[in-house]
Image (tube, helix red, strand yellow):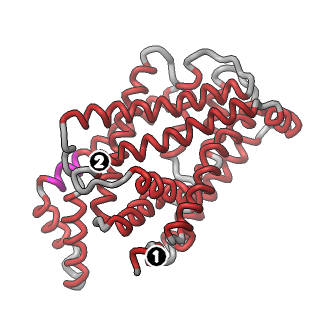
Amino acid sequence: MKKKLHFIVGIAISTVFIILAFYQVRLSELVDSIKTASISYVLIVLFFVIFSAYLRALRWYYFLLPQKKIDINSLFSSLLIGYGANVILPAHLGEIVRAFVLGKKKKLAVSSTLATILVERVIDILTFLFLLIFLLLIYDFPKWVKESAIALFVVALLLIVMIIFIRIKTNATIKLINHLLKPAPLKFREKINHLIETFAAGFVGLNKKSHYVVTFLLSIAIWLGYVFGFAFGLKAFHLHLPWIAPLVLMVITTISIVVPSSPGYIGTYHWLCQLALGFFGVGKSEALGFALVIHALNTLPFLILGLICAWKEGVNIFQFSRNRPALAPKQAVN
């Protein structure tokens, strides 16, 4: 019921934002704006989208290195499956999917792998805030963007505190959870204890000091990849805007990931992208055409590549929310 309710609420929110995005939009102008998009620049945007994902896989390599050395191809394949699942499944379940797939394939504890993904997300938030602080010095964002930045900072801070507490006070965490789950059966509590222990094991420092520098530079490069994607997207639509426009687009559309919505951030992404372009005087129809194309480039390739990789791994991501064992790769069963 909770999953169904979450999905229904997400669909409702997306529907509202889709209505807002299409309000006062002339379909003829929308179609014309998409038709005039330069294919060569669209392909460049696609390159940066895929390349940024590859950089994420490379950064994940360093986060997992203290546990096990894993080849980049396996990491990239698992990441693509997770991204494809995020297009289909609600509530960022794709992150759990990629942890499950990699854990089964490489014989890693899924909870430990998931812990590295949580660290990855904290680093993403901190890097995003670092770039946002820079932008706030040179661009006057609306009040709600600044408030969203504060909210993200609080979330990052809470996650960091939680990670430190679980890592340093693992036994205390287990005792607390056991106390809260006292009415539950002993076997269930033992499974939870094991999950917490393996989850805590995933929060380990990087192997070398130089790896901290490498992961920091990769984090910056990932976000710059998104910015360049927006920059060439503007060129594809013949929009000659100030150099800061791609950065503003990156900031505003990132907030769409935080807002609860249907799988693939449908509706929220389009309206916020439209809103950001409106700051620079771009019309609603042309802005929505831009949003539709850029959103498609950020979702459809991952859906297609994710499904291909899932097929190769023997994974059924469609059944994940209903039957998790269906995710087990074939080679892990043999």
Relative height, residue 3 to residue 249 (above, below): below
The location of residue 153, given as percent across then percent down, is 34, 37
Residue 279 is left or right of residue 322, and the answer is right
Element at label 1: helix
The stretch in magenta equals 161-167
In the image, what residue occupies the spot 83% across and 35% down?
Answer: 35
In the image, what residue occupies the spot 71% across and 28% down?
Answer: 236
In the image, what residue occupies the spot 35% across and 30% down?
Answer: 217
Residue 92 seen anywhere in this rendered image of the structure: no
**Is 204 part of what is drawn in magenta?**
no
* Residue 306 position by quadrant: bottom right
Relative height, residue 20 to residue 322 (above, below): above
Residue 148 is left or right of residue 206, and the answer is right
Query: Which one is in front, 104 or 180?
Result: 104
- Kind of residue at badge 1: Lys
Residue 183 is left or right of residue 113, and the answer is left
